[in-house]
Amino acid sequence: GAIIGILGGGQLGRMLSVAASRMGYRTHIFEPGGTPPAGDVAHAVTTAAYDDLDALRGFAEAVDVITFEFENIPTAALDLLDTLRPIRPNRRALAVSQDRLVEKAFLSDLGLGTAPYAAVDDAVDLAEAVAEIGLPAILKTRRFGYDGKGQARIMTEAEAAPALEAMAGAPSILEGFVDFTHEVSVIAARGADGRLACFDPGENVHRDGILRTTTVPATLTDAQRAEAVDIAARILDKLDYCGVMGVELFVTPEGLLVNEIAPRVHNSGHWTQNGCTVDQFEQHIRAVAGWPLGDGSRYADVQMENLIGSDIEKVADYATDACAALHLYGKTEVRAGRKLGHVNRVTRR
Ligand code: ATP
Ligand code: MG
Ligand code: MG
């Protein structure tokens, strides 16, 4: 059977490996970190840094196709991998999502609404951006942010300087604060044949910048639901995308705005594991392996709750709930803010 190479060995890589294994594939993980959660279930693991080009070459030569579970893969690594094996989704999707400024420009060019934004490299830029966009606003590093890290809220003029300092000189972007009623995301898949399949949008609640719960169905009118899916479709088509993508949206009285895109399986898509015949992980492997996409229509109402840090102590309680499907990542080290598992509570429709 073919071997699917996955860059990144976190829980997303682990769940991709499980899906691939179920479909008769083996996976080979490339991961710089010590004991990756995906290592338990993958066929092989290469533990090496992204600047270890020999290790990267060996990894690529051992697999048939390369995909990834996180977007911050260094360009030099991609340059090498690209010459050896197909990378799915393609590098353009990575380039767009790796830089919040490039991402916002891409979305705006597509005619999609976003928060007002401006590039900020120094105090002069920031003063101009605040004058243009107004307060409150959020300063974010252009690259490497996740789970709300690398962000500082600016509520008053006095908070501008400390916010800039917190960016530690990293190129940044100021975003106007969106007064959204709630947040939703579309987990969208596009096959190698260009066919699209979107999962039903989920409603997301964050706490301390980290996704807490995703609930389907989301609070949306039929028109909003259709618009959300259409936005995702336009993004994937424009990128000639192959695989699963998470598209995060703000719902406002004035319409839907795109917050950000993630060119990979997405935490807010975990509910699909227990709400659909074909979940986001299988859908991604199908796309990457060149299969037709499966049926991702939703047959149940689901609430996904992340188990973060000390939440893991509640596992025994979840275990007694017959309608709660537990998904644990096998991480032994418990840290505040670390995602250790999730639980899908299913209600039949
Ligand atoms: P992720 O883990 O989803 O990749 P991230 O670190 O990339 O997170 P964002 O998605 O940009 O961060 O922001 C995290 C959360 O902060 C959003 O889901 C939203 O709740 C809030 N947020 C971000 N940008 C804005 C904005 N412009 N206006 C209002 N709230 C915002
Ligand atoms: Mg993000
Ligand atoms: Mg986000």
Image (cartoon, rainbow, N blue to C red):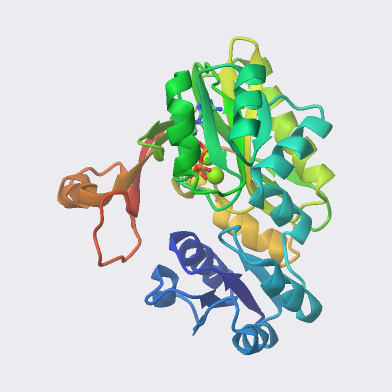
Residue at left 66%, top 48%? 99
Rendering quarter of residue 291:
bottom right
Q: Is residue 112 above or below residue 65?
A: above
Going by the image, does 48 lie left or right of 189?
left
Quick check: can you spot residue 204?
no
Q: Residue at x 54, y 76 (%)?
A: 30
x and y percent of residue 61 in the render? 69, 87
Query: Do we see residue 342 in this rendering?
Result: yes
Rendering coords of residue 2 (x, y %): 67, 80
Q: Quadrant of the N terminus?
A: bottom right
Q: Which of the 4 quarters of the picture holds residue 58?
A: bottom right
Residue, x 63% and y 32% (percent of image)? 124
Looking at this view, is 215 or 240 the one in front? 240
- Front residue of 217 and 104: 104
Left/right of residue 109 with respect to residue 45 in the rendered view:
right
In the displayed structure, 285 sits above or below 49; it is above
Q: Does residue 249 appear to the left or right of 31 in the view shown?
A: right
Picture coordinates of residue 329 (x, y %)? 35, 62
* Residue sitting farthest toward the top: 253
